[in-house]
Amino acid sequence: MPDCYIALGGNQGNVRETFSQALERLNQHPEIALIETSQWVETAPVGSQTDATFLNGAAHLSTSLSPEALLAELQAVETEMGRVREVRWSARTLDLDLLLYDQLILESAGLLIPHPAFWYRRFVLDPLTEIAADVLHPQKQITIKQLRQRLLKRPFVFSIAGLPPDEAAALIDGLKAQYPDVVFTCWELTEKVPQAEEPTLIAWLGAPYSAPNGDLLPVLPRLDLSGTGSFTEQIVHVLQSALDFQ
């Protein structure tokens, strides 16, 4: 049966007990087997919607369910455990994210596999590395352990791509005040500089027709933040996920 990995998170109620009940519920399903779990770790919340510490972890499942059916089962368990979906990054009793389904790459209206953000989130990678260190990320083409190690490198270099240089400079000036230890660069100004530090992350902020197109950026450090919303807020959330682990 396919091997799958899920992330668990929560910061309301007795989260350890909730995790235990949720995993027991999944393991009782005739087409799901619980193989292994990580240790549970306390982590700092991302965003400003809650200040309560989260508990996070990871689990290895084996299943004969399709990806869509497994996602539906995870969401049903969340609901059973009192999860209410209202505000992103808000307090919650239980969050179950489907991270990997073997080496499948799937993009549909309701499901993206691999999970599009877990590869730069320490609160996911730290527990996941315990149980899946040598598992390959099917898009980034390096292991889970290597993805985590990339985030530990200092200086942490965050490059911005897809904006005019003056807009990128203004954005970087604002970010430096919040993250003085992070090296911020404009990708278009540094990509051809031989001695430039390789970015840990490159955030694409441009439109699809911008030059260069986001798809031309290096696959490993690339993440797409070109959707609606404040670029500063999105980048802060990414940096909180990648740096402010505890």
Image (spheres, rainbow, N blue to C red):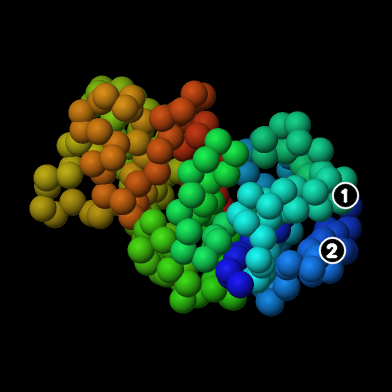
The secondary structure type at the circle numbered 2 is helix
Residue 100 figure quarter:
bottom right
Q: Position of residue 3 (x, y in %)?
A: 58, 70
Q: What element carries label 1?
A: helix
Image x and y of residue 205, in percent: 36, 31
The answer to whether 208 is drawn above or below residue 6 in the figure is above
Quadrant containing the N terminus in the rendered view: bottom right
**Residue at position x 80%, y 65% from top?**
29
The image shows residue 175 at horizontal and vertical percentages of 42, 35
Number of numbered markers: 2
Contact, mark 2 vs mark 1 (Cβ under 8 Å): yes
Q: Position of residue 9 (x, y in %)?
A: 72, 55
Q: Earlier in the sequence, mark 2 or mark 1?
A: 2
Characterize the local packing of mark 1: few (<14), some (14-19) or many (20 or more) Cα atoms within 10 angstroms. Answer: few
- Nearer to us in this view, 209 or 108: 108
Position of residue 39 in the picture relative to residue 142 (left or right): right
The residue where tag 1 is placed is 80
Which residue lies under the disc numbered 2? 25
Q: In this view, does 31 lie to the left or right of 200?
A: right
Badge number at residue 173: none
Looking at numbered disc 1 in the image, what kind of residue is underneath it? Glu
The three-letter code of the residue at mark 2 reads Arg
